[in-house]
Image (cartoon, rainbow, N blue to C red):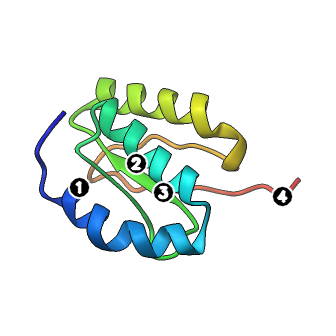
Amino acid sequence: MNDFEGWELNEVGTYQVMEELWRRDVVRGVMDVARQEGALYAMMSSAGPFIFAVAEGREPAERVSRALQDRFGEFFSGFALGEAGVKMRIDLLED
């Protein structure tokens, strides 16, 4: 586990807002799992629609992604893995 100061900012500010807008157990759980699996930082974008995690390298990023998919896959329409500095495009498909 790392000591990146952003985690503490999440816990006192943004977490509280996001937990009121969405499911508290899922928001808190996603952040906890991401941190436990080695993410440097994770957060929900504004009031959604996505949650992102930043990891130091591809292997840790894949570990975080797998853990989040395994535990929270039912709550999200998809997962994507990208690299810093590379543009990503995510197309959401409707059921």
| Of marks 3 and 2, the one in the foreground | 2
Marks 3, 4: nearer the viewer: 3
- Badge 3 element: strand
Q: Which residue is mark 3?
A: 51
Q: CA distance from mark 3 to mark 2?
A: 9 Å
Query: x, y (%) of residue 18?
Result: 48, 70
Q: CA distance from mark 3 to mark 4?
A: 19 Å
The amino acid beneath tag 2 is Met
Give the residue pinned by disc 2. 31
Q: Is residue 5 left or right of residue 83?
A: left
- Amino acid of disc 4: Glu
Q: Is residue 28 above or below residue 46?
A: above
Residue mark closest to the camera, 3 vs 1: 1
Q: CA distance from mark 1 to mark 4?
A: 33 Å
Residue 30 numbered mark, or none: none
State the image coordinates of residue 5 (x, y, percent, origin top left): 12, 57
Mark 1 lies on a secondary structure that is helix
Measured as percent of width and height from the top left, residue 8 is found at 20, 59
Q: Image quadrant for the N terminus?
A: top left
Query: Badge 1 is on which residue?
Result: 7
| Nearer the observer, 69 or 29 | 29
- Which numbered disc flags the more N-terminal residue, 3 or 1? 1
With 34 as the anchor, is 48 left or right in this view? right
Closer to us: mark 1 or mark 4? 1
Query: Is residue 88 something one can see in this rendering?
Result: no
Question: Viewed as shown, does residue 57 lie left or right of 61?
Answer: left
Q: Which mark is residue 94?
A: 4
Q: Find numbered disc 4 in the image and state the secondary structure of the residue it sits on.
A: loop
Q: Residue at x 51, y 36 (%)?
A: 68
Q: Is residue 31 left or right of residue 8?
A: right
**CB atoms of marks 1 and 2 within 8 Å:** yes
